[in-house]
Amino acid sequence: MIKNVLPILLVATLFFGCGGEEKRYVSASSGDINSIVVVSDNLLWENNVGEAIRDILATSVEGLSKDEPQFSMSQMPTEVFSGFAKNNRTVLKIEKGKEAATQIARDAYAKPQTLVVVSGQTNAEIIEQIKTNSAKIISAFKKTEITERQRRTSKSLFNDSQIREKLGVSLRFPTAYRIAKTEDDFFWIRRDIKTGNVDLLIYQIPLSSIRKGDSAVIDIVRVRDSVGKIHIEGALENSYMATEPAFTPFIHNVIIDNKSAFETRGLWDLKNAFMSGPFLNYAIEDKVNSRYIIVEGYVFAPSIAKRDYVFELESIIKSIAIK
């Protein structure tokens, strides 16, 4: 009798957790970074509903020299959304003929996965849901993609002990990068790519260096230009990195490592030379140590898309832990 009971107990353990709750086992999700599958009837995708979706999710990324969509999208008819198709990591599902609502589900068919279901009785109701909840929808998808990008990075991490010792800051970046320059509390971290390079800068400045309010962007540009002139020199004589003056940077208040921060996106150029590209700068307020930690990523990759490189840098910067 005991021999017969043991296999039954083993099966019960596999399928039921504490308190008798059933555990769900789902497949691993898949998909390219920043790629969303839109599940909807073809007619909806081709008419004003699809237009509303594209207006929200394919809006241009701030701070790039050429327009690139925040998310790439592919549409799939509702009737073929089954099997492996349900394993996509980020899915937007449109359901017409149901009560107007926007619902966000985690790991519904695969893991990790974010499924956003937008419903409405009419096209107008669906469009209203998309527009009203656009910030929530974008935030849900972006959070998933940042986490996925960081997960891929964690497979082969660079030893950041030098940065931790000098700045009291931990930063998770892959071994494809190298520390190209370190002076006192300044670090220049680089990754070579076929068409150029993807780089990070990290350093600290006094809290008094950046004023709050409308003056913040002026101070951030002043600081990064002074640092660029000292540390980021070009191959030509008297060439150095500075902020592109003809392009007004975008600045937002954000939270990084549970601390207030300024996020600034814009274009850099190499003074007295012919190089330029996008940058992403975070000034993180570290009140405990009376300083701002500045972490900046920038890309030099002429003639190719830069969205995913900037996103990689963003995911690295958002892994920061200030001690």
Image (cartoon, rainbow, N blue to C red):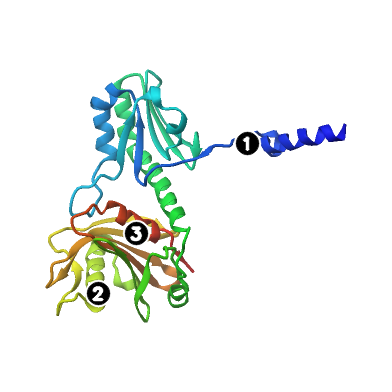
Q: What amino acid type should be assigned to the residue bearing mark 2? A: Ile
Q: What amino acid type should be assigned to the residue bearing mark 1? A: Lys
Residue 278, image x and y in percent?
A: 23, 59
Answer left or right for 82 relative to 252.
Answer: right
Reply above or below: 88 against 237: above
Nearer to the camera, 99 or 11: 11
The residue tagged with tag 3: helix, strand or loop?
A: helix
Tell me the tag on residue 23: 1
Mark 3 crowd level (few <14, some 14–19, many ≥20, 10 Å Cα): many
Q: Are marks 2 and 1 in contact (CB under 8 Å)?
A: no
Nearer to the camera, 115 or 210: 115
Q: CA distance from mark 2 to mark 1?
A: 53 Å
Determine the image quadrant of residue 25.
Answer: top right
Label 2 belongs to which residue?
232
The residue tagged with tag 1: helix, strand or loop?
A: loop
Mark 1 crowd level (few <14, some 14–19, many ≥20, 10 Å Cα): few
